[in-house]
Image: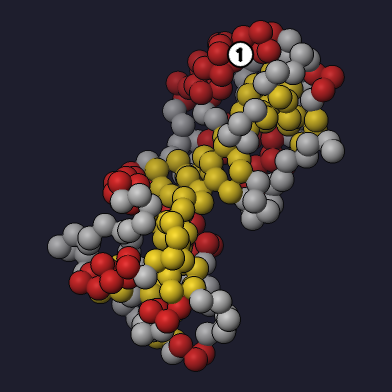
């Protein structure tokens, strides 16, 4: 990630005081680094490369997401937002640096001190969001041929943008997983009987378990519905958004929550 030459140090006494024993840190992460974190049992960051003298964790999800989407995704086609807790007493030895606007805050940990930082991580490093690069035209062509109709233009524009939310946690703790058109068709094939009982269905995502976010392509605009994989028809579907554009806006804002009709 690109660094800032004129970052402003903020002394510990000037940042908001939190009485907890740990500080929450975030990090934009590429695939190779995430694989090494996973290999550690989600307990440690890998050693820095020779041309990486500093480890840069940041202090909020917004900043980590911005770097992930603007740097990691273009560089590798995928980027992750990760979160971890570090013992406050350990971090108090470091300054917080303001590397731009008010919310652009980060720590600068020398590479030779990274093992010591790892020793003071409390709990596991967690993946909070996965972002992907543009989906190919071919996938949308395949979907059009299989469905006999085009997916909504707003959905295509979102998946073919510079980066899109693939999966992860919303601010209200809902877990959302979105599908590419090719993955959608694979699910249609796997759940052929259920798919057949929902004419006009397009499975665009879900909660990572039984519940599926689907479009009802019989209508224009197509509403976003929630359907259980064992559902026998549209009668039991629960409306989640009036159209896919509304769904995208809520996912991008981190405010989407499933309505289970309880």
- Circle 1 residue: 191
Q: Secondary structure at mark 1?
A: loop
Question: Which image quarter holds the C terminus?
Answer: top right
Q: Measured from the top left, where is residue 126 in percent x and y?
A: 46, 53
The residue closer to the viewer here, 209 or 96, is 209
The residue closer to the viewer here, 26 or 98, is 26
Q: Measured from the top left, where is residue 231 in percent x and y?
A: 74, 18
Q: Is residue 192 left or right of residue 164?
A: right
- The crowd level at tag 1 (other Cα within 10 Å; few <14, some 14-19, many 20+) is few
**Farthest left residue in view:** 50
Q: Is residue 43 visible?
A: yes
Residue found at x 47% / y 45%: 130
The residue closer to the viewer here, 44 or 171, is 44
The residue closer to the viewer here, 105 or 75, is 105
Q: Measured from the top left, where is residue 170 in percent x and y?
A: 62, 50
Residue found at x 65% / y 42%: 248
User: How many tags in the picture?
Assistant: 1
Relative to 202, residue 29 above or below = below
Q: Is residue 262 left or right of residue 174?
A: right
Question: Which image quarter holds the N terminus?
Answer: bottom left
Q: How is the image coloured?
A: secondary structure
Residue found at x 25% / y 73%: 113
User: Could you say which quadrant of the image residue 226 lies in?
Assistant: top right
Relative to 20, residue 57 above or below = above
Relative to 255, residue 133 above or below = above
Residue found at x 39% / y 66%: 121
Q: Is residue 70 visible?
A: no
Q: Measured from the top left, where is residue 110 in percent x and y?
A: 25, 74
């Amino acid at each position: 990630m690109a660094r800032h030459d004129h970052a402003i140090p903020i002394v510990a006494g000037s940042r908001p005081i939190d009485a907890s024993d740990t500080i929450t840190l975030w990090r934009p992460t590429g695939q190779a680094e995430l694989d090494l974190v996973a290999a550690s049992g989600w307990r440690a960051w890998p050693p820095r490369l020779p041309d990486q003298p500093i480890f840069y964790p940041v202090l909020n999800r917004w900043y980590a997401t911005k770097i992930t989407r603007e740097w990691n995704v273009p560089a590798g086609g995928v980027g992750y937002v990760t979160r971890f807790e570090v013992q406050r007493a350990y971090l108090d030895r470091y300054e917080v640096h303001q590397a731009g606007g008010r919310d652009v805050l980060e720590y600068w940990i020398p590479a030779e001190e990274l093992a010591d930082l790892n020793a003071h991580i409390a709990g596991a490093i967690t993946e909070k969001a996965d972002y992907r690069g543009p989906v190919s035209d071919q996938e949308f062509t395949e979907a059009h041929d299989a469905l006999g109709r085009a997916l909504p233009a707003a959905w295509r524009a979102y998946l073919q943008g510079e980066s899109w939310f693939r999966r992860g946690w919303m601010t209200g703790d809902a877990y959302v997983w979105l599908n590419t058109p090719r993955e959608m068709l694979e699910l249609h094939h796997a759940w052929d009987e259920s798919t057949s009982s929902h004419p006009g269905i397009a499975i665009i995502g879900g909660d990572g378990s039984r519940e599926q976010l689907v479009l009802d392509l019989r209508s224009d605009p197509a509403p976003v519905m929630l359907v259980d994989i064992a559902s026998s028809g549209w009668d039991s579907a629960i409306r989640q958004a009036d159209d896919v554009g509304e769904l995208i806006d809520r996912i991008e804002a981190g405010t989407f929550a499933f309505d289970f009709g309880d």
